[in-house]
Image (tube, rainbow, N blue to C red):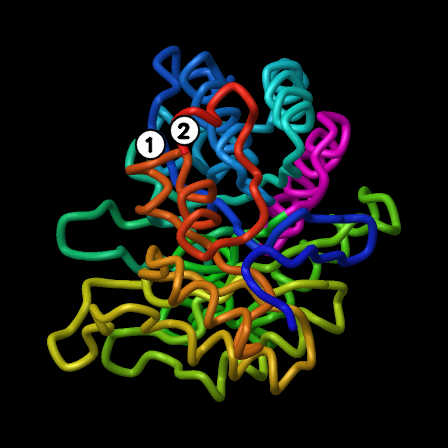
Amino acid sequence: MQNLFSTYKIKNLELKNRVVMPPMCQYSVEKKDGIANDWHYLHYVSRAVGGTGFIIVEMTDVEPDGRITDYDLGLWSDEQVPALTKIVEAVHSHGAKIGIQIAHAGRKAEDAAEPVAPSAIPFDENSKTPRALTTEEVKGMVEKFRLAVRRAVQAGFDAIEIHGAHGYLIHQFHSPLTNKRDDEYGQDLTKFGREIIEAAKAEMPADMPLIMRISAREYVEGGYGIEESIEFSKAYKDAGADVFDVSSGGEGQIAAWGRPGTHAAYQVPLARQIKEALQVPVMAVGRLDDPILANAVIGNEEADLVQVGRGMLRNPYWTLEAAKQLRKENIVPKQYEAGF
């Protein structure tokens, strides 16, 4: 029977356990050049030492104005590759695998002088009104994603995640709330995301998995739900997505009637429904910090991988503690055995 510490393989990605560190922005690029620094190195490598099977580097952007803030990581330049390669090699040396999330913030780019989006609709009353991308600019944006993925492959990552969730640019294109275009990218709301997936796959080795992160439900009036997200996810699967990272929300200020659950595992049912409808591997996320609960999600086959976010921010050795609590095989580094 599979459990949190079962091995897992998809394509060439072989994981020693089902524990995933999700992408969580650190806002720590002090030089504002998009280049990873000592903070990022220590942050990610410590979780590899801590037993995590798969680490996903935070939202890394395809152009300077695609960042949420100017303190975010980027992959729009070859100069940003070496620092990421150093992280990848160190993570590998401690037995973990590592992916990276490629993204563009769209209208949620807080520090951009003029954010861009599918349509000129601001995120909220306190946000800048974005400029709607022209059709040619949209095609150019696909190319920027392609080049960022190319650099990620050069850096040695084991998998690529495309960020299509949380109200960022790809999400803005496939949501009827934010895409009011009358061109080809408005007539087919999945076209932008599909083209990015296809461009990414063209740059990736055939045996490297591509992960698509989605918001499976929107928490605002008129927002889409699980049935709609199943449909656009089918389009993304057909375009080449191998795994779905299932989250929710992020597209606007949450209306009181649509507030997401605050209970443990509140998003797991969404992941399970995507898994069942598409027959694809899924990653679950959202208040899964309890090892017994995380283990149950895997054992009950609700998801294939479990992401532990806040718990791993609090404790880089969450996975070691979970193994001890669940009485799984000893995975503690010999240097730390006295502590366990």
User: Where residue 37 sits in the image (x, y, percent)?
Assistant: 47, 14
Q: Amino acid at mark 2?
A: Asp
Can you tell which quarter of the image residue 218 is in? bottom left
Residue situated furthest right in the rendering: 206
Tell me which residue sits at (36%, 49%) in the image.
107
Q: Which mark is residue 69?
A: 1
In the rendered image, the vertical position of residue 236 relative to residue 28, given as above or below: below
Report helix, strand or loop for mark 1. loop
User: Where residue 297 sits in the image (x, y, percent)?
Assistant: 48, 71
- Residue 157: say if magenta: yes
Can you tell which quarter of the image residue 238 is in? bottom right
Q: Are marks 1 and 2 in contact (CB under 8 Å)?
A: yes
Q: Which mark is residue 314?
A: none
Q: Magenta stretch?
A: 135-160
Q: Which mark is residue 72?
A: 2
Tell me which residue sits at (43%, 71%) in the image.
180
Q: Main secondary structure of the magenta part?
A: helix
